[in-house]
Every structure is written in structure tokens, then in C-alpha cells.
Image: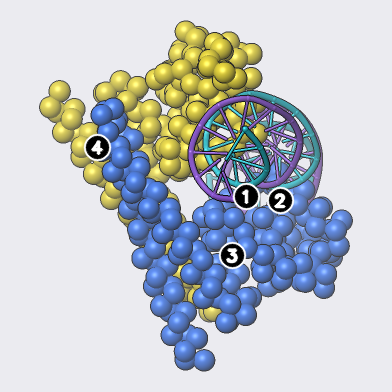
Chain colours: A yellow, B blue, C purple, D cyan
Amino acid sequence: MLDFAILGLLREQPRHGYELKRALGDLGFWQVSFGSLYPALRRLEKQGFIEAAKGEGRRKAYRVTETGRIRFGEMLAESGDDSDRDFQLRLAFLGYVEPESRLGVLEDRRTALQDRLHGARRSFRGARSSTRNPDRYRMALMERRVRSTEADIAWLDELIAGERSATAGA
Amino acid sequence: MLDFAILGLLREQPRHGYELKRALGDLGFWQVSFGSLYPALRRLEKQGFIEAAKGEGRRKAYRVTETGRIRFGEMLAESGDDSDRDFQLRLAFLGYVEPESRLGVLEDRRTALQDRLHGARRSFRGARSSTRNPDRYRMALMERRVRSTEADIAWLDELIAGERSATAGA
DNA sequence: CTCCGATATATCGAATCGATATAAGTATAT
DNA sequence: ATATACTTATATCGATTCGATATATCGGAG
């Protein structure tokens, strides 16, 4: 997953490790550690997906190779897990997906969120009607899950609507 | 962090591994894997914080020891990181914190979320006014972050209000 | 009676994290 | 000018966590 993120970021422009950490952090949902990042760069270099060109000072600027570009394309096409992180990462690179496939990615996510919402509502209702007294704080947690999933779906629907009009306009 | 969760769940009632996984998953924000759980149980048993009593069939029911109960209290008092998961876990066990300390935990979280919100808004505004054309999908990600943080603060404020009236009523 | 999904424990390798080490550059204060 | 402190930058360590897999039992459906 980190490999995917690195390839995607390097695809835009060459960057050194520290800069990659910043760029990835700026995406807003993953504060990656150096303990993950540097080994990942070695890994990718050894596999021939990226290569290092010496940058200014002690910086090591990396750029994707042609093989790396292909690998990124493959990873982009694979269907990932249904974690928030995975989706957000894919969304950050959705611009690299062929326009006609984008809507599908968003709709798959919507389905996953709908499932999550049903589960969350079921837990919430189940806990309220339970004989076991459900702790106030855990009830709050369940309510939060319901609400934030609903909000996420609403946000996603806006994105889907935007995607539809963009596709129609093209 | 998993150790903390296990001690907290076992404090309520003895449970075996599989049941712990389910109980933790039911909390809604952490689908822990067996690869994390079973080693954690060994770890805690070796440290003397939990002990296994044979349950029905091949089940191994664990319960907290007195030392484990003390350890849990210590962990509960420590200030954790500012990750969502850490907070949600602490909230799930907030009932074990002395009532007069609970408000502080919630208010600390509020401060952390406010900081996050400022950062998120700054990124969002910065990207909008940037000369570099910010990708539509990344803009959406930034907006999502702003909105979900706002929603989280609103939710937390309700919880804080409830806490205040509960404390006043007692 | 067999097949299948849920229950239950366990382990392996790999990915990721958090902490730490090191050192050079850069700004600030004394 | 010089000490102090923060940011930049690469790197590694041990521990935690994950995802996949192995194995075996149990209960119910066909």
C-alpha cells in the first residue's frame, strides 16, 4: 500500500524521502513513519520500480522507472481492501484512472459504505433495545459511527454527482 | 494499545480469544487480527496481567489478575497519542475513569480536534488559492477532512454537554 | 451422512510504527 | 561571533500489527 503511494507520488515529480513523507502527510489521512518509508524506497529500488539520482546536498531524489509506471498502473486497476485509507489513497490517484472507469470506483465505495452503515445502525439499535445496560460512552461511539458513515456517503454522493456531470460534459 | 483493550474487555468478564476479537470488533473501530490477538494474550499472560482458566471445549477463558487490573488503571491514566483509534478506545473505557477526570479527557480531545481542523482548513484554503492546479479528487479529500473533523467536534460537544449535566446532577 | 459455514486456536512472514541516532543547515538570541 | 534550538535529511532497531494460512471441531442444511 505504501509502495502504491510512493509510485503515485513519484509519478508526478521526482522527490527524495523526506519530501515524500511530507507529500504523503499532506494528503491528510496517513502520517507515514520513516521506519516504513525508507525500507519501502529500498524495496522499490531493488525491484527496479524506482531509481535514485543524487539531488542537492545529502538528498537522494528518486524517480519512477518505466517498469514502475507500469506497476503503478496495475496496482491502480486492482481492487483494494475496503479500508478508508485504501480508498482515500486510490481517490488521490483517481486522475490516473481512465475517465470511464472512475465512476465504478466511486460506486463500489458507496456500496461498501452502505453495508457499513447497515451494520452500524444494527449495532446501535441492538444496543439501545438490549437488556444489558449499554454504557453511555459506547452508545456515543456507535452513534458516531452511524453519523460519520452517513456523512461520508453524502460527501461521496457529491463526488459521484460531480463525476457524472464531468463525464457527461466530455 | 491492544494490551490496553484486552485488559479493559476482560475486566468486565472473562472471555476467550475468539470472543475478545468479536467484542473488540463490535466496538466498531478496530477489526483486530488473530495474528495480533493471540500473541498479545501470551504476552499479557507471561507478564502476569491475565490468567487462563480452561473453558468449555477447546476454549481458553482468560481473566485479569489483580496486577492486570492495576496495570489497566495505569494505562487509563496515561495520556495516549492523538489518533482516532486511541481516543475511541479510551472512550470505550471512560466509565472506569473517576467521574471528575472524565471531562478533562474529552476536552483534551476537543483541543486536538480543533488543531486538526485548523490544519485541515489551512490545507484546503491553500490548495484552492494555489497556482498549481489542485486535482479535483484531492480537493474532495481535503474537504472531507474538514467536514468530518467539524462533525466530530460537534459530536464530541454533545458528549461534553452530557458529561457536564451528568456531573452537575450527581 | 455429507457438506458447509461458524467457531476456535495458532503461527508465519511482511508491513508498519515509534523511538532513536546522527549530522548538517538555518534562524534566533545573547 | 557564538551558543542554542529548530528544521531538514537519511538511516536503523525492536516491537507491534496485519493478512494469509493451517488445522480441527461443531452444528445445521440438504
Q: CA distance from mark 3 to mark 4?
A: 39 Å
Chain identifier of the residue bearing label 2 in the image: B
Residue C29 placed where, x, y %?
A: 54, 49
| Chain-order first, disc 3 or disc 4 | 3
Q: CA distance from mark 1 to mark 3?
A: 16 Å
- Disc 1 or disc 3, which is closer to the eye? 3
| Chain-order first, disc 2 or disc 4 | 2
Label 1 CA crowd tier, 10 Å (few <14, some 14–19, many 20+): some
Identify the residue shown where x is 42% and y is 67%. B156
Kind of residue at badge 2: Leu
Q: Secondary structure at mark 1?
A: loop
**Quarter of the image where the N terminus of chain B is located:** bottom right
Circle 1 sits on which residue?
Answer: B32
Q: CA distance from mark 1 to mark 4?
A: 41 Å
Circle 3 sits on which residue?
Answer: B90
Examine the rendered structure and indicate whether residue C30 appears above or below residue A36.
below
Circle 4 sits on which residue?
Answer: B129
Are the two marked residues, 1 and 3, in contact with CB atoms closer than 8 angstroms?
A: no
Kind of residue at badge 3: Arg
Identify the residue shown where x is 80% and y is 57%. B44
Q: Nearer the viewer, residue A104 or B152?
A: B152
| Chain-order first, disc 2 or disc 3 | 2
Chain identifier of the residue bearing label 3 in the image: B
| Chain-order first, disc 1 or disc 4 | 1
Q: Nearer the viewer, residue B103 or B25?
A: B103
Q: CA distance from mark 2 to mark 3?
A: 18 Å
| Chain-order first, disc 1 or disc 3 | 1
